Image: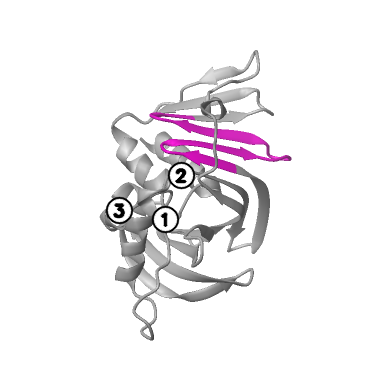
């Protein structure tokens, strides 16, 4: 389970994760959490797919170190393809109950079977990608924190505390910034229990692009070593 959670977390953190929507509340009364979650319900009904550029920054607080990497993300239903660029090139693919992590530098692909943990993966990996307000409440304690601005756009900031003990052991809080005009994520932050955190920025976001099924097929170069980590 520990190895699977690490793979699940890797997908969500790099990619991963969070079209939460932002709603207009009654005129003159500002935004409310209930209004945001109702908009999420409406938004989820017509969400099919997404493509975006992704920038991931890991911050190690004790030594004040920041490392940044970039890549591209494709999502369609329960399928996800994340391709990270050099120097730490890797491909993370989720197709149904299977997660693959391919590292060309090692000429190796790790395969994880979600099995009974599929619900946790759906909640964590696909967080916000078509997530309804009701589903979000099931997985997290939610607080509408503030209205913020990212790249000149108004965003709603939500604080999420995981209800799952397995997720909570790794992340004390997840924060998501949502573009008020597109209902898509601009940024999210995952805070670990030790205080270190990851910031994920999304740009060139496209909602419901036509993505062929072939994009989510596990094709690896000839000679790639296949491993199935246990536990």
What is the C-alpha distance between the residues marked 2 and 3? 15 Å
Disc 1, disc 2: CB below 8 Å? yes
Residue 196 appears in the figure:
no
Assign a secondary structure to mark 3: helix
Q: Earlier in the sequence, mark 2 or mark 3?
A: 2
Query: x, y (%) of residue 152?
Result: 63, 72
Query: x, y (%) of residue 185?
Result: 51, 58
Q: Earlier in the sequence, mark 1 or mark 2?
A: 2
Residue 95 appears in the figure:
yes
* Residue placed under numbered mark 2 in the picture: 9
Q: Earlier in the sequence, mark 3 or mark 1?
A: 3
Q: Residue at x 65, y 18 (%)?
A: 221
Q: Is residue 36 above or below residue 138?
A: below
Assign a secondary structure to mark 1: strand
Residues in magenta, as a range = 73-99
From the viewer's side, name the closer residue of 62 and 49. 49
Circle nearer the viewer, 3 or 1? 3
Query: x, y (%) of residue 213?
Result: 51, 27
Q: Residues within 10 Å of mark 2 (few under 14, many from 20)?
A: some
From the viewer's side, name the closer residue of 149 and 194. 149
Query: x, y (%) of residue 31?
Result: 38, 76
* Residue placed under numbered mark 1 in the picture: 171
Q: Please give the label number shown on residue 139.
A: 3
Residue farthest toward the right in the current orientation of the protein? 87
Q: Residue at x 29, y 50 (%)?
A: 165
Circle nearer the viewer, 2 or 3? 3
Q: Please give the label number shown on residue 58.
A: none
Q: Quadrant of residue 57?
A: bottom right
Q: Is residue 200 above or below residue 74?
A: below
Give the main secondary structure, helix, strand or loop, of the magenta stretch.
strand
Q: Residue at x 39, y 38 (%)?
A: 2
Assign a secondary structure to mark 2: helix
């Amino acid at each position: 389970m520990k190895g699977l959670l690490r793979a699940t977390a890797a997908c969500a953190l790099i990619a991963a994760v969070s079209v939460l929507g932002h709603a207009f509340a009654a005129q003159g009364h500002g935004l409310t959490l209930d209004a945001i979650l109702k908009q999420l319900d409406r938004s989820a009904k017509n969400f099919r797919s997404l493509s975006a550029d992704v920038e991931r920054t890991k911050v190690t607080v004790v030594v004040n170190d920041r490392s940044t990497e970039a890549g591209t993300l494709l999502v369609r239903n329960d399928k996800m393809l994340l391709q990270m660029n050099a120097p730490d090139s890797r491909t993370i693919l989720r197709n149904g109950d299977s997660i693959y992590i391919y590292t060309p530098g090692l000429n190796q692909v790790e395969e994880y079977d979600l099995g009974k943990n599929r619900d946790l993966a759906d909640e964590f990996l696909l967080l916000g990608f078509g997530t309804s307000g009701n589903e979000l409440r099931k997985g997290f304690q939610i607080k509408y924190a503030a209205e913020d601005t990212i790249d000149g756009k108004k965003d709603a900031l939500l604080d999420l505390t995981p209800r799952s003990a397995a997720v909570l052991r790794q992340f004390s809080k997840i924060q998501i910034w949502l573009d008020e005009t597109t209902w898509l994520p601009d940024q999210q932050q995952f805070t670990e229990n030790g205080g270190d955190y990851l910031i994920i920025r999304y740009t060139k976001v496209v909602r419901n692009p036509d993505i062929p099924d072939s994009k989510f097929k596990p094709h690896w170069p000839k000679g790639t070593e296949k491993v199935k980590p246990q536990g």
